[in-house]
Image: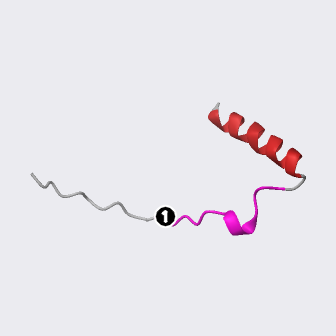
Amino acid sequence: MGGHAAKVARKDIEKNLGKSVIIHQNKLNYQYIAKKEKLENKE
């Protein structure tokens, strides 16, 4: 449901601006870690 609201908001902004708001310069760079590290118990 939240994704739909974000899509509608983005489409409305793009309609008002007359251009896309998603461009190469504002993309996020994610780095996925293959293995999970165990957290130490610090009690």
Q: Quadrant of residue 25?
A: bottom right
**Displayed quadrant of residue 38:** bottom left
Residue 35 vs residue 16, the one in the foreground: 16
Locate residue 41 relative to residue 31 in the image: left or right. Answer: left
Establish if 41 lies above or below 31: above
Instruction: Say what amino acid the circle numbered 1 marks.
Output: Tyr
Q: Is residue 38 left or right of residue 36?
A: left
Residue 21 highlighted magenta (yes or no): yes
* Percent position of residue 27, x then y: 66, 63
Q: Residue at x 35, y 60 (%)?
A: 36
User: Residue farthest to the right?
Assistant: 18
Q: Which residue matches tag 1?
A: 32
Q: Is residue 29 magenta?
A: yes
Tell which of 5 and 31 is nearer to you.
Answer: 5
Q: Quadrant of the N terminus?
A: top right
**Where's residue 28, x and y in %?**
61, 63
Frontmost residue, 7 versus 36: 7
Q: Residue at x 73, y 68 (%)?
A: 24
Indicate whether 41 appears above or below 3: below
Q: Main secondary structure of the magenta part?
A: loop
User: Which region is colored magenta?
Assistant: 20-32
Q: Residue at x 63, y 34 (%)?
A: 2
